[in-house]
Image (spheres, rainbow, N blue to C red):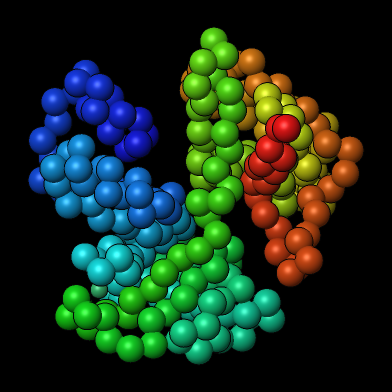
Amino acid sequence: MLRLLATEQQAGRLQLHPVLVLSTAEGLPPAERDRLERVFGAAVREVYGCTESGYAAYGCAQGWLHLLEDWVIVEPVDAGHNPVPPGTVSHTVLMTNLANRVQPIIRYDVGDRVLVRPDPCPCGDPAPAIRVQGRASDVLTFPAAGGRGVVTVPPLALATVVDRTPGVELFQIVQTAPTSLSVRLRPDPGADPDRIGAAVEEGIAALLANLGLAHVTVDPAPDPPEQTTGGKYRTVIPLPPAPPSS
Ligand SMILES: [Zn+2]
């Protein structure tokens, strides 16, 4: 959304003068960050979090994310959920929300790979500084309806739709062709797989239609979600880039 607004501003169709631009959920490539700063004439910072934690960390001028330690506990861990030391990229991260007393979230496995800075951040902020990996690569890209340009969909948007559907234990959305998605589902024990599958596909189709992507098809996959060789379940798997044409 931010990148779309920047493009509109660049084209002269928007006249926004923000003091600060905050980017959530999706990692910004450095070139995009530079473009946003240039186009909006404002500092661009990132915030990090998930639905379960709310904001967990905020970006500093050095490009690190500093933890909100009175709000969340963030534990970078290996595949066996053992702590990994600072300076090591974790397998996943366990998030505990200290502020939500209505629905306790304790050591929730977020699935992000994070690295905790082993030394003090040069920005002077004493809060632990982290970097998050492994999200930006899962952004889906579709050809736009008129055949001109592309539309990108962040993995979080799709995952949120499925997370809201009751009865889903595990899911994986796979882009099988430029305009085709296939949904692998593992329903909760005792849940009706056909009913849940239909609800999930309907939710995804509605989201896509909202984004002008009604031409993208959503079908059930015959196979269950697959693990990577590292034992991780990716919730969204984009189409691999096409080999360069000769
Ligand atoms: Zn910093």
**Residue at 89% of width from left, 38% of height from top?**
222
Image quarter for ligand 1: bottom left
In the rendered view, does 102 fall on the left or right side of 197? left
Is residue 244 shown above or below 74?
Answer: above
Residue found at x 65% / y 21% = 216
Q: Residue furthest right?
A: 222
From the viewer's perspective, is residue 228 above or below residue 130?
A: above
Image position, residue 36 (x, y; %): 26, 43
Left or right of residue 140, residue 36 in this image: left
**Quadrant of the frame with the C terminus:** top right
Coordinates of residue 116 in the picture (x, y in percent): 42, 79
* Residue sitting nearer the eye, 11 or 156: 11
Q: Which of 39 and 102 is in front in this view?
A: 39
Q: Please identify the quadrant where the N terminus is shown.
A: top left
Q: Quadrant of residue 164?
A: top right
Q: Is residue 67 visible?
A: yes
The answer to whether 246 appears left or right of 37 in the picture is right
Q: Can residue 195 be seen in this view?
A: no
Q: Quadrant of residue 123?
A: bottom left
Q: In this view, does 120 lie above or below 244?
A: below
Q: Which of 29 and 79 is in front in this view?
A: 29
* Left or right of residue 3, residue 246 in this image: right
Residue 227 horizontal/vertical position (percent):
78, 60
Measuring from the top left, give residue 99's x and y in whole percent. Answer: 33, 66
Residue beneath the point at 70% across and 64% down: 232
